[in-house]
Amino acid sequence: ENAALLKAIIENAIDGIITIDESGHIETINPAACKLFQYSPEEVIGKNVSVLMPPPDRNQHDEYIERYQRTREPHIIGIGREVKGLRKDGSIFPFRLGVSEVPFADRKIYTGFIHDLSREKEAEEQLKEYA
Ligand code: HEM
């Protein structure tokens, strides 16, 4: 069945996938995202997605979403951005974030695709040391 296939694809994706509601609360998180942020689904479902980021974005993310809903002017949706994530152990890692707005069952959700950039950034730093 189609829904089961989609679920299998999301469960086995290499990139992290998180969905939030219109107020920024986490509704679903796939295994790749759990591994990156070091949380189990139960620990973060229902929490504000801002728990997964360091300041200053952490304190402003609700405003980012509100502003988008008010102005319809995207800053990440359809563009992407390199941002920082905060793991459960307090460490910070860089990733490429892609966000889409998804009309779903008479409401709206947002999906976030998380592509880890830790290795690339480390390699970049090492190259700089040799330069
Ligand atoms: C907007 C950071 C995760 C959904 C933004 C902006 C920043 C940001 C900086 C606004 C940029 C600006 O106004 O110039 C982060 C960071 C994350 C994160 C550091 C690390 C965990 C997510 C996730 C989702 C999401 C996982 C969705 C599941 C949104 C939405 C907006 C937004 C809907 C408003 C639309 C837009 O500006 O295009 N975020 N975000 N964010 N973010 Fe996040």
Image (cartoon, helix red, strand yellow):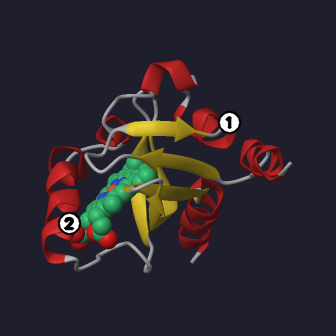
Q: Which amino acid does label 1 sit on?
A: Pro
Q: Nearer the viewer, residue 112 or 3?
A: 3
Q: Residue at x 47, y 53 (%)?
A: 105
SS category of the residue bearing label 1: helix
The label on residue 128 is none
The image quadrant where one finds the C terminus is bottom right
**Whether residue 6 is situated above or below residue 44 in the rendered picture:** below
Ligand 1 closer than 8 Å to label 2 CB: no
| Residue under label 1 | 31
Mark count: 2
The structure residue drawn at horizontal position 56% and vertical position 62%, both measured from the top left corner, is 121
Residue 54 x, y percent position in the rendering: 29, 43
Classify residue 68 by image quadrant.
Answer: bottom left
Three-letter amino acid code at the position of disc 2: Gln
Numbered disc 2: secondary structure: helix
Query: Is label 1's Cβ within 8 Å of ligand 1?
Result: no
Most extreme residue toward the front is 106
Q: Can residue 84 be seen in this view?
A: no
Q: Where is residue 53 in the image (x, y as percent from the top left)?
A: 34, 44
Left or right: where does residue 6 sit relative to residue 39?
right
Q: Going from the N terminus, do you reach mark 1 or mark 2 first?
A: 1
**Quadrant housing residue 34:** top right
In this view, the residue in front, 74 or 22, is 22
